[in-house]
Amino acid sequence: MPRPKMPRRICGKPHTNCFKPNAIPLSELETVTIGLDEFEAMRLVDHQGMQQLQAAEVMGVSRQTLANLVKRARAKTTACLVEGKALVFESEE
């Protein structure tokens, strides 16, 4: 059985629930879901320019966990941009 997921501090939320190509209805697009923890990791590192260690402390995770989150978020975002998919943000529980 996998270890339970540790709670992560999330301060920044997406301003919308999805990001998609223009002029194509969401119902016609393949979607990729990005978790709020992945969004927050990418926001802190790529948008705010924090070092990974500092961002990990802000989120309350290890540096390696933060690096994994950023890597997954970048891969999902890149796939959406290159392949014309919709990026859907996970909603709060």
Image (tube, rainbow, N blue to C red):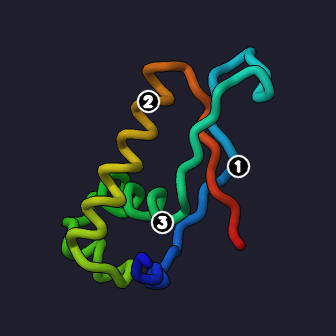
Residue at 43%, 20% (x, y): give it: 82
Q: For this view, does 12 lie left or right of residue 15? A: left
Q: Amino acid at mark 3?
A: Asp
Query: Which is nearer the N-term, disc 2 or disc 1?
Result: 1
Query: Which is nearer the N-term, disc 3 or disc 2?
Result: 3
* x and y percentages locating residue 67 in the rendered image: 25, 61
Q: Amino acid at mark 2?
A: Ala
The residue nearer to you, when weighing 26 against 15, is 26
Dot 3 falls on a residue whose secondary structure is: helix
Q: Residue 25 sits in which quadrant?
A: top right
Q: Residue 75 sits in which quadrant?
A: top left
Residue at 62%, 51% (x, y): give it: 89
Label 1 vs label 3, nearer the camera: 3
Dot 1 falls on a residue whose secondary structure is: loop
The residue pinned by badge 1 equals 17
* x and y percentages locating residue 27 in the rendered image: 80, 27
Q: Using the numbered discs, state the Cα–Cα distance from disc 1 to disc 3 in whole angstroms.
A: 15 Å
Q: Using the numbered discs, state the Cα–Cα distance from disc 2 to disc 1 in whole angstroms.
A: 18 Å
Label 2 vs label 1, nearer the camera: 2
Q: For this view, does 20 lie left or right of residue 40? A: right
Q: Residue 70 sits in which quadrant?
A: bottom left
The residue pinned by badge 3 equals 37
Q: For this view, does 14 lie left or right of residue 11? A: right
